[in-house]
Image (tube, rainbow, N blue to C red):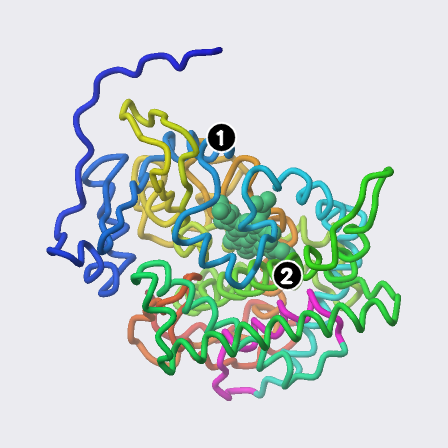
Amino acid sequence: MIREPAPPPAATIATAPGALPLLGHLVALVRDKFDFLRTLSAHGDLVWVHIGPWRALVVTGAELSHEVLRDDRLFDKGGYLFDRIRETGGNGLVSCAHADHRRQRRLVRPSFHRDRLPGYVRVMSGQIDAVLGRWRDGEVVDVLADMKTITARTMLPGGLPADVIGRMSEDMNVVLAGVAWRSILPKGLDRVPTPANRRYRRAQDRLRALVTEVIADHRASDTDHDDLLSGLLASCGPRDGAPGLSDAEVHDQVLTFLLAGTETTANVVCWALHLVSRHPEVERRLRAEASGVLDGGDVTPDDLARLAVARNVVLETLRLYPPIFLLTRLTTRDTHLGGHALPAGTTVAYSPYAVQRRAEHFPDPDDFVPDRWDGGQEPPRGAFLAFGGGARRCVGDTFGLAEATLMLATITLRWSMRPTSDDEVRPATSLVLSPRALRLRPLAVPSGTPETLHTTGASA
Ligand code: HEM
């Protein structure tokens, strides 16, 4: 048996300041969890956070985050958060434990094969056109709702009526916010028949029913529509003599993809549009680039590769506002981290938000500087975790990046998104980092004049 090397002696791990008797850091987290997360690194690369009777060890340093993500057998999915995610997404790829993970990942992986990307990009482009075609010059839009319509429609069959997509999107909001609350509140409270709990259960039931219906329709039509659902259902069947996913597993997987893939991409585009609306110079450069690439023909993956400014803006937005800002793991045996002994069953949390706001890897970490991504140089390992890392890294990273880049470039080419107020846009309370009530006013850009733009407006 290989023995772990004895770790160097280490000082004790600090507890984040401000813990209240019984409640722990609950009040600080509810008041402003982002401020709380940002300031954690001042207390070390590992910090204890208490929520009621529970505690989690939050990793704020890049190297230790990498160490956690590198060993997904030791730091496995589990604990309060994933128990709650499983209530909706079942044992899908996001929430399954290590023991199930490799088989599931192998089965879904082909749906993201490079060969499918041209079809996906065509569908994305069509859905972006459909939503932007409804915008009117100067008429304020609910950006998040529209972005979610696009991302949901690139996953699901294009024929789903708008009201079904709208309802689904509302249900996903309720479920994601519910999961966030439930993972910090005492367990018994979720069984009390409060209006919020009933809303949560109804939203879950409707989402499950929708997914059942969509899968049945897809199987009945037996057609590949180039959407992600077609890719997923095609890849989940038996392969090389090994059985495929069962019907229940396919159901969990589709629901997981919907929850993991639509909100994340939609939110990152919203934050990007918000940032660009306050940085006219970035807007000008985005538009100049897009006008040379998106020239009216069919968009291809090669076109996306030429949208370097848009990609940098998306990466910088993912750094500042990672849609998934805090995730947990559970240690499966006694171990050490950063020289500290951790017993089996310790909840360890990694935070893309906390790590990506550290100045040693990203100077002026709170500033929006898309050019820091120029030259394609990778940040140090563990310093950029918007897509997670290791074997559990996001399986839809290329898909999500492609879609966000195309959405941002197409919108900026045709519309100048103006802020509707100078107020700070605050994050909403949910599992996904969302801009609360973001409204922007699209002003039409005359075609063929990328340099003569609306550049007035607030600057952040
Ligand atoms: C910009 C968009 C996206 C962001 C920021 C994002 C972020 C993440 C993160 C941080 C994880 C790791 C979770 C963990 O460590 O526990 C993850 C995993 C995952 N994501 Fe994404 N995601 C995005 C888009 C997508 C899309 C488009 C899909 C599907 C179509 C998707 C499906 C998944 C799945 C299935 C996993 C679990 C992977 C595994 O454990 O093997 N994501 N994502």
Residue 366 relative to residue 76: left or right: left
Q: Return the residue nearer the eye: 139 or 318.
A: 318
Q: CA distance from mark 2 to mark 1?
A: 34 Å
As for residue 396 lying within the magenta part, the answer is no
Circle 2 or circle 1, nearest the eye: 1
Residue drawn 44% across the image and 61% down it: 432
Figure disc tally? 2
Residue drawn 44% across the image and 41% down it: 384
Q: Amino acid at mark 2?
A: Leu
Comes first in the chain, label 2 or label 1: 1
Q: Amino acid at mark 1?
A: Asp
Q: Position of residue 92 (x, y in %)?
A: 60, 53
- Res 42 visible: yes
Image quadrant occupied by the C terminus: bottom left
Mark 1 Cβ inside 8 Å of ligand 1: no
Q: Which residue is mark 1?
A: 71
Residue drawn 38% across the image and 83% down it: 195
Q: Mark 1 packing: few (<14 Cα in 10 Å), some, or many (20+)?
A: some
Residue drawn 42% across the image and 61% down it: 431
As for residue 146 lying within the magenta part, the answer is yes
Q: Which residue is mark 2?
A: 406
Q: Position of residue 21 (x, y in %)?
A: 11, 55
Q: Position of residue 246 (x, y in %)?
A: 74, 54
Q: Mark 2 packing: few (<14 Cα in 10 Å), some, or many (20+)?
A: many
Q: Position of residue 223 (x, y in %)?
A: 88, 66
Residue 134 relative to residue 39: left or right: right
Q: Return the residue nearer the eye: 24 or 409.
A: 24
Query: What span is colored magenta in the figure?
Result: 137-158
Q: Is residue 204 above or below residue 432?
A: below
Q: Name the element at disc 2.
A: helix
Q: Name the element at disc 1.
A: loop
Residue 4 relative to residue 113: left or right: left
